[in-house]
Image (cartoon, grey):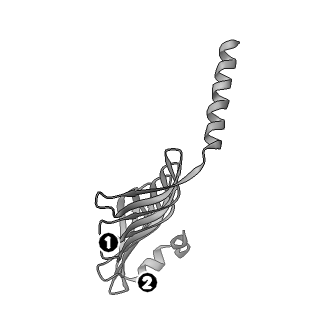
């Protein structure tokens, strides 16, 4: 009886502590004083919106955390500020549609991902024009199309909205 009361008390104490932890704004700097990262912390875990920077001061990536894991929509940039990629995270893993950019800042390809791997469609672009579509299942390519007519004939286009 005493043992179960002790564990119940300990559980309540830990639960209360996690609810009472205040969010604090955290900033970390490179050795030369340039801002490296900034965002919200709850205890020792990243939470809410965060930004990370290159040593040249340009934004490297930005997005949200929940319990120290990436969540929601994120953006990634090259040191020259051009977008590299953007997309959805769920519990620290890439999910849903992701867009990948070329060196000119145009979409190179966009893919449906699940748990960090291609799972669904990938649409390939060249000079802003769709040139190819591929379909993946758990990271393995299962089909490829090079013309829209055959792609449309074999697929339900509503799958592209996911």
The one nearer the camera, 150 or 77, is 77
Q: Residues within 10 Å of mark 2 (few under 14, many from 20)?
A: few
Q: Is residue 18 above or below residue 51?
A: above
Mark toward the viewer: 2 or 1 = 1
Q: Foreground: 100 or 65?
A: 65
Dot 1 alpha-carbon crowd within 10 angstroms: few under 14, some 14 to 19, many 20 or more: some
What kind of element bears circle 2? helix
Tell how many labels: 2
x then y, percent, for residue 55: 30, 65
Q: As displayed, is residue 80 above or below residue 49?
A: below
Q: Residue at x 48, y 51 (%)?
A: 69
Query: In the image, residue 12 lies at what x, y percent?
Result: 67, 31
Residue 14 seen:
yes
Residue 46 disc label? none
Residue at the spot 52% in from the left edge and 48% down from the top edge: 67
Outermost residue to the top: 1
Q: Split into 4 quadrants, where in the image is the C terminus?
A: bottom right
For residue 19, side relative to residue 147 (left or right) = right
Of 80 and 97, nearer the camera is: 80
The part of the image, by quadrant, that contains residue 29 is bottom left
User: In this view of the protein, which residue sits in the foreground, 89 or 14?
Assistant: 14
Q: Say which quadrant the N terminus sits in.
A: top right
Residue holding disc 2: 149
The residues tagged by marks 2 and 1 sit, at their Cα atoms, a distance apart of 36 Å
Identify whether 46 is placed above or below 126.
above
- The tag on residue 78 is 1
- Along the polypeptide, which appears first: circle 2 or circle 1? 1
- Residue 136 position in % (x across, y down): 39, 63
Q: Is residue 92 left or right of residue 77?
A: right
């Amino acid at each position: 009886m005493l043992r179960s009361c002790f564990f119940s008390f300990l559980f309540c104490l830990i639960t209360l502590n996690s609810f009472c932890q205040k969010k604090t704004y955290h900033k970390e700097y490179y050795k030369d004083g340039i801002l490296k990262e900034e965002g919200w912390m709850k205890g020792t875990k990243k939470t809410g919106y965060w930004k990370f920077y290159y040593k040249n001061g340009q934004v490297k990536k930005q997005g949200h955390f929940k319990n120290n894991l990436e969540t929601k929509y994120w953006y990634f940039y090259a040191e020259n500020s051009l977008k590299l990629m953007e997309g959805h995270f769920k519990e620290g893993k890439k999910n849903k549609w992701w867009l990948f950019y070329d060196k000119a800042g145009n979409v190179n390809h966009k893919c449906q991902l699940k748990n960090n791997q291609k799972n669904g469609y990938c649409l390939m672009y060249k000079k802003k024009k769709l040139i190819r579509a591929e379909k993946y299942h758990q990271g393995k390519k299962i089909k490829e199309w090079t013309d829209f007519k055959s792609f449309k004939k074999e697929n339900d286009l509503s799958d592209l909205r996911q």
